[in-house]
Amino acid sequence: MSDSDSGPAVPDPLVLGTRGSTLALWQANYVKSKLEARGHRVLIETISTRGDEARDTAISEIGDEAVFTKELDYALLAGDIHLAVHSLKDIPSTVPEGIQLAAVAERENPLDAFVSHPSFDGHLHDLPEGATLATASLRRTAQLRTWRPDLEVVPVRGNVDTRLDKLDASDWHGMVLAVAGLLRMGLSARIRQRIDSEIMIPAVGQGALGIACAADDPALADRLHTVLHDAAAGYATDAERAFLAEVQGGCQVPMGAWARLTEDHTLEIDACIAALDGSEHYRGQRSCAPEEGPAEARALAQSLLAEGGAEVLDRILGDQVNRASPFRP
């Protein structure tokens, strides 16, 4: 009897939806291999998203928190696919009605990476005055400018390989990308430096994979959780996503949150809210039991908002957010 025969009934074969980028397909095939090892047949369905199609527009300007997930959500709700695999950082803090986040797979390194131009033989601390760095992220931009106000930070879009090609053909000193994506694509040699969290707190969910399915399919959700869910990654990202929800942030908000379990099973949470020009930076940390992570993360968000983070977000978002209290967006 196969492993899948002993659990709840699930569709056969399973149709797995994913974006079509090289990294997204790596992630989809990783999940596929895990499911196939437990006796399931899996077919991959590639779906283009708005974020993939609007490659010349900054993500923060598209104005849609679900820019990389909405089309996959539609396919789930229509029954065209049975599960979707996402970079967890792309999933909005509030999952759409009718969809559930069934599992968070084992997490890769969540830090950011400094990738240098082939002609620059140095690390971040070796960058000259006024050096140029490229990034697609407001979070990275704000934290880079907080650390080094003299840096010129320029926007760049595209898949990982496209961005690396743009870097190599440019006069930039370097670029900031996620460590996880570079490792998964076999590009570890491009990592000049893993950026310490004292300089740059990662994005919510960075390095983690989120596996979603329809909310009305508890048998499949249970199976996905059993086969794919990693408890440590789940505790950490639950806290990070609680911070995100409390701040009501997305790609338009320069904020970061990183939680991780220590050896003594304590959950450490670091988070920040920063002004785009680096002139203001509100940062804090909490330690708690893993089960208390979401509550502690929400309290940390309230604290940073009260310290001045709310005013920073007001200036960035203007009337886009309707504040429920003086300290909360």
Image (tube, helix red, strand yellow):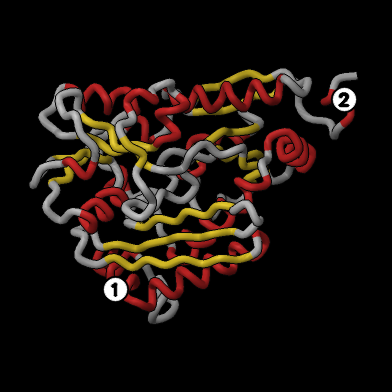
Identify the residue position indicated by label 1 in the image. Answer: 311
* SS for callout 1: helix
Instruction: Give me the residue at 56% from left, 65% from top.
Output: 287
* SS for callout 2: helix
Question: Residue 290: x and y, percent?
Answer: 65, 59
Identify the residue position indicated by label 2 in the image. Answer: 5
Amino acid at pointer 1? Glu
For marks 2 and 1, the one nearer the N-term is: 2
Instruction: Give me the residue at 37% from left, 42% from top.
Output: 112
Q: Is residue 31 above or below residue 264?
A: above
Residue density around tag 2, few if under 14, some if 14–19, many if 20 or more, within 10 Å: few
Q: Is residue 232 above or below residue 116?
A: below
Question: Residue 91: x and y, percent?
Answer: 50, 45
**Left or right of residue 111: residue 225:** right
Q: Quadrant of the C terminus?
A: bottom left
Marks 2 & 1, CB-CB < 8 Å contact: no
Q: CA distance from mark 2 to mark 1?
A: 55 Å
Taking depth in this image into account, of 34 and 219 the one nearest to the observer is 34
